[in-house]
Image (cartoon, rainbow, N blue to C red):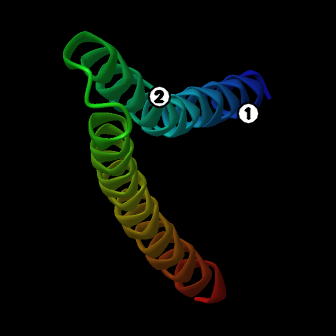
Amino acid sequence: MVEDSTSRRRRHTAAMAQAYRDSHEIMSAAMSIAIFAGGGYWLDMRYGWKPALTICGACLGCVMAVLSVRRLLVRLDKQSKRGRGQQADNRETHQE
């Protein structure tokens, strides 16, 4: 019984840690848009090229955000497939 509650607590802690990692990647994607757009705006104000560098910065930030979210989705897909494989293995051992 003690092992059961300990293993349950570890699984819960691991799930929370994974959720924090995933939310960090999503926030990083959002921040990349803001940082690149803000940098473009700052350069526009400095050099007087009003909207050009802000637009370029926002586009570059969007590209970085899409790449970050894609990397997250690929990792989550691999974890999901790995989890399904383990569940199938567990079902086979319990049926025997």
Picture coordinates of residue 22, whole percent (x, y) = 52, 39
Residue at the outermost front position: 48
Picture coordinates of residue 57, whole percent (x, y) = 30, 38
Nearer to us: label 2 or label 1: 2
Q: Tell me where residue 58 sits by quadrant.
A: top left
- For the point 51% across and 36% down, which residue is it? 30
Amino acid type at circle 2 is Ala
- For the point 19% across and 17% down, which residue is it? 47
Q: Tell me where residue 91 sits by quadrant.
A: bottom right
Q: Helix, strand, or loop for circle 2?
A: helix
Amino acid type at circle 1 is Asp
- Give the mark, 2 or 1, whose residue is nearer the N terminus: 1
Count of all numbered marks drawn on residues in the image:
2
Q: Which is nearer the eye, 13 or 45?
A: 45
Query: In the rendering, which numbered label is found on residue 34?
Result: 2
67 w.r.t. 50: above or below: below
Picture coordinates of residue 12, whole percent (x, y) = 69, 32
- For the point 30% across and 28% down, which residue is it? 40
Question: Dividing the image into 4 quarters, which one contains the N terminus?
Answer: top right
Q: Helix, strand, or loop for circle 1?
A: helix
Residue neighbourhood size for the residue with mark 2, other residues' Cα within 10 Å, grouped as few (<14), some (14–19), many (≥20): some
Cα separation between marks 2 and 1: 45 Å
84 w.r.t. 27: above or below: below
Q: Which is nearer the eye, 25 or 62?
A: 62
Query: In the rendering, which numbered label is found on residue 71?
Result: none
Query: In the rendering, which numbered label is found on residue 4?
Result: 1
71 w.r.t. 10: above or below: below
User: 8 left or right of 84?
Assistant: right
Question: Dividing the image into 4 quarters, which one contains the C terminus?
Answer: bottom right
Residue neighbourhood size for the residue with mark 1, other residues' Cα within 10 Å, grouped as few (<14), some (14–19), many (≥20): few
Picture coordinates of residue 59, whole percent (x, y) = 34, 51
